[in-house]
């Protein structure tokens, strides 16, 4: 799981129904975020750090994310 997968989880949870206001959307996002286990978040953050290092090594160019 990576950083971008986190957005997919949040989107699936919060966009399944319409929200009546921005505040309702914010509450839905916070509820979805709080439901994600910390291990999943830690793994996503760790994988994102690895991507950043590879990007730096590639000097901003293309790189394989494995």
Image (cartoon, helix red, strand yellow):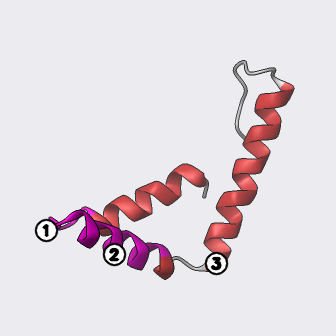
- The residue pinned by badge 2 equals 27
Q: Percent position (x, y) of residue 14? A: 30, 66
Q: Are marks 1 and 2 in contact (CB under 8 Å)?
A: no
Magenta-drawn segment = 15-33
Query: Which of pointers 3 and 1 lies earlier in the amino acid sequence?
Result: 1
- The residue pinned by badge 3 equals 38
Name the residue rendered at 69%, 21% in the picture.
Answer: 62
In whole angstroms, how far apart are the C-alphas of marks 3 and 2? 19 Å
Q: Which mark is residue 6?
A: none
In whole angstroms, how far apart are the C-alphas of marks 3 and 1? 29 Å
- Residue 16 belongs to the span the image colors magenta: yes
In terms of image quadrants, where is residue 51? Answer: top right
Circle 3 or circle 2, nearest the eye? 2
Circle 3 or circle 1, nearest the eye? 1
Is residue 28 shown left or right of residue 16?
A: right
- State which quarter of the image contains the N terminus: bottom right
Query: Which of pointers 3 and 2 lies earlier in the amino acid sequence?
Result: 2
Q: Percent position (x, y) of residue 53? A: 82, 38
- Residue 27 belongs to the span the image colors magenta: yes
SS for callout 2: helix
Name the residue rendered at 17%, 67% in the picture.
Answer: 19
- The residue pinned by badge 1 equals 20
Placement of 41 over or under 51, stated as above or below: below
- State which quarter of the image contains the C terminus: top right
Q: Percent position (x, y) of residue 20? A: 13, 68
Name the residue rendered at 62%, 71% in the picture.
Answer: 40
Is residue 65 shown left or right of residue 30?
A: right
Is residue 32 shown left or right of residue 6?
A: left
**Crowd class of label 3 (few under 14; some 14 to 19; many from 20; radius 10 Å):** few
Q: Percent position (x, y) of residue 36? A: 52, 76
Query: Which of pointers 1 and 2 lies earlier in the amino acid sequence?
Result: 1
In terms of image quadrants, where is residue 46? Answer: bottom right
């Amino acid at each position: 799981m990576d950083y971008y997968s986190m957005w997919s989880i949040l989107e699936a949870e919060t966009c399944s129904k319409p929200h009546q206001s921005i505040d309702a959307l914010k509450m839905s996002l916070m509820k979805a975020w709080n439901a994600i286990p910390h291990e999943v978040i830690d793994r996503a953050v760790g994988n994102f750090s690895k991507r950043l290092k590879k990007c730096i090594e590639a000097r901003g160019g293309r790189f394989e994310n494995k």
